[in-house]
Structures are given as structure tokens and as C-alpha cells.
Amino acid sequence: MMQFYSTNNKNKKFSLEEAVMEGLAKDGGLFMPEHIPQVPESFLKNIHTLNFPDMCFQIAQNLLQDAIPLLKLREIIDKAMIFDAPVRELSAQIHSLELFHGPTLSFKDFGAQFMAQLMAYFIQDSKQTLHILVATSGDTGSAIAQAFLNVEGIRVWILYPKDKVSWSQEKQLTTMGHNITALEIDGTFDDCQRLVKQAFSDKRLRQKLSLTSANSINIARLIPQTFYYFYAYVQVTNRNAPLVFSVPSGNFGNLTAGLLAKKMGLPVHHFVAATNINDIVPKYLNTGKFEALPSKQTLSNAMDVGNPSNFSRMLDLFGNHENMREHIFACSFTDDQTKAAMKTVFEKYDYLMDPHGAVAYLGLEAYLVQHPGKVNGIFLETADPAKFADEVEKITGQKVEIPNRLATVLSKKKHAVTLAPDYEEFCSLLLKA
Ligand SMILES: *Cc1c(COP(=O)(O)O)cnc(C)c1O
């Protein structure tokens, strides 16, 4: 049986259900699989004959073993992995892995959809409604809301800071209805997070309500993110050159998933950790010192993280600084560099990037300069440029097409409950539900 441990204590083991439903271990650590089995050699040999869902199923089955009945696992994959992750070739060395073809146009849809299906499976026999609390500064909230929309037995509460998310993000958060309630908090993102944390530590509330969180530390979000690294590998034509992935990083969940894929046997030569000026991890790799800082606002705002939550998983995988340095090339970029890259890539390759993908592109470019030679370079394009249409148009001069699934949401009416950043008010609202 595949079990999990907390990064703070390797001796105590947890089931997949405990790891997924608890999210964060009670000792404050993050859950990790007790071992990471290699995929069979035959799988890698025949991987190009598999379609994406079949590939996902085999990878998940190999990792989770008998933690979920196979038929159920297949059902979960078939419900969750319903959009493509195509690779676009910009040049022989540079490819974009487009991870934004899901319902809310960011790569977070992969993790959210899989986690929703997994949670729905675990609560299927429970009589109590499960309440999911999410504090969001944008992308996470909409991916979670969309993934849990109309999932039976689950009620979702999204807390977002009033006037501090973009207009289109707000529409994505507030137009779902059904089992999704948007709470517009008259305060900051930190207030939203504080309210959620307080609810989790409120014993009285937890006796009455079954609560869970859905943030990026949940292991259920990392598992499906390993799939597309394999899928990208299949799509790059020249498979003999070393494979390099450049990952635009904030909390480092996406990069950690890539590290897991490599442990499973995907032949990755190097990872590039690309950040904006919130450069905690690049600094750590250069100096050996990890120093969390307040986050700074940038153009690639989903990566404005001052204390990357998945860092403890990265340390757990590598054991020490030296080892991590050997496998990860890290660099950080300013907004001006990001904008210049968006413009250059559009002019040179006729390809539009969003600001997050542009940071990853810059990371790959920096890697190629320092490591000349033939490689298959792939940068992860984590959001649709349409999510940042105003900026992208201003920078490139090119009109951005708004996909239908976003246009539909933008035309819907906003429904949100406005709340002061006050715990008593928030708590009584939850109890009335
Ligand atoms: C969340 C997010 C990231 C950062 O991903 P992490 O897993 O937190 O490192 C990058 N790009 C976009 C568009 C995001 O929404």
C-alpha cells in the first residue's frame, strides 16, 4: 500500500486519503509519498503510442499502486484530465508547453480538477457536507471553484480581497453559483488567509463542520502535474538531445512535480527554476541560505511569493543544498526583462506569451547561454495570454483573442457576499450554511 509521511517526521505514515483530506500535516509538514517507484522500462519505451489520459493513468497507477481501486482511478483520470497540453516549437532548442487549455486558463486547472475528483471519491459515503475554504489572490480560487462546481457533498467558500484582484479574475470567482460562494473581504489577501487559518484552528467550529483546505500544498495537486512533463517529453521530436524544463515558480509546486517525474524515471537533464524578483530560491541555490521575505508585487503576480511553500519538499527530495544545486539552475528576472522578452518573442517567433511564461522563457534562454550545445528546451507556459490581455496588448502591440470560455464568464453577473475582515462574522456565516 502506498503511504505518505510528513516532511517533519518520516516515521509516521498516512494513507492517501489522510494526506489528501488533511492537506497540511498536523505537525506543519507537507505530505510526501514514502517512496517514488520508477515507471516500468516498457512504459517509457512505448510512451509515444499512448494518448494523454492513458499515459496519466499508467503514471498514477504506478505511483499510487493500490491506494485507489484501479477502475476508480481510471474514472478520476477520465473526469479530470479533459484538456490538452500541447507543445509548440519556437526553435530547435526552444519549446513552449502550453498548460492553459483548461477551464480557467491556467495550469492550476490540472491540480484542481484531479484533487476535486479525488476528494469527491473519498467523501462519497459521508453524510456530512465537506466545506472547502480557499483564500485566493487570483488564479487558485477560480481553478478550485471551477473544479468543485456541482461536486456532490462539497461546498466551497472563496475568500478574495476586495478591489485587489483583476476584473476578469473577479468575474471568474464570482459567477459560478451553485455550491460555490464568493466572499469579498474588505481587506487584504493576508486578511483572507488569516480568516481561513483561524477557522481551521477553531475547535468549536470544527466539531460542527467538516472543513478542508485546497491550497497548493495538497499532494493531490502535485500528482497530476507530473503527468504533463511526460507528455511534453513525448512531443519533442528530437528525443536524443538532453531534456531541459524551465518552470516559472512561486510556491514551487509545479517544479516539485517535475522533480517527482524525474524520480519516476523521466530522463530530465536539468531543471531551470525561474522567478521574478521574489528570488528566495535562486538566492538559496547561490548562497545556501534560505531567507523568507515579504512578497513584492510584480507583473507575474501569481509568482509573488516570499516564502515558497513547497521548498520543504524540494529539500526532502535532495537532502542538501549541494545536491539541489546540481539538478536545478536558478535565475530571477525583473518586470522590464519580462516585458522585453514578451515583445522579442512575439517579433521573432510570432508567439504571444503571458508574463509568467515569459519568465520561464528567460530562464531557458539564460540556461542555453551558459550551457551551449544541443538540448530539447521546454519552458512551461502556465497562463493564457488572454488572462493578461491588457498588458500583453500594450507590450506587444498585438490584439489578444479572448477564448470563448473566458468571454462567457466575463458576460455573467457577479454574485459575492461582502464581509469585513472579522472572524466572528465569517464564522457565523459558515455556521448558517
Ligand atoms: C501559480 C502560478 C505559477 C506558480 O506556480 P507554483 O507551482 O506556485 O510555483 C506560475 N504561473 C501561473 C500562471 C500561476 O497561476
Image (cartoon, rainbow, N blue to C red):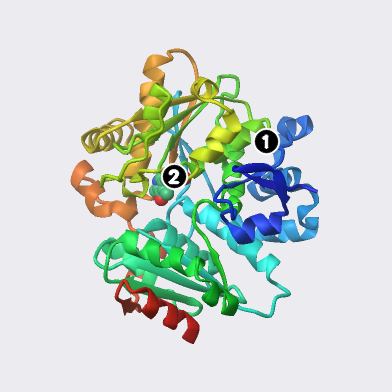
> Residue 92 location, x and y as percent?
45, 24
Q: With respect to residue 201, does 420 lie above or below?
A: below
Residue identified by numbered label 2: 251
Amino acid type at image mark 1: His
**SS under mark 2:** loop
Is residue 407 visible in the rendered image? The answer is no
Is ligand 1 closer than 8 angstroms to the Cβ of mark 2?
A: yes
**SS under mark 1:** helix
Q: With respect to residue 422, does 320 lie above or below?
A: above
Q: With respect to residue 20, does 281 lie above or below?
A: above
Check the image and name the residue furthest to the bottom. Answer: 432
In percent of the image, x 50 and y 72: which residue is there?
A: 156
How dense is the environment of label 2, judged by Cα within 10 Å: few (below 14), some, or many (20 and up)? many
How dense is the environment of label 1, judged by Cα within 10 Å: few (below 14), some, or many (20 and up)? some
Is residue 354 or residue 215 the one in the foreground?
215
Residue identified by numbered label 1: 48
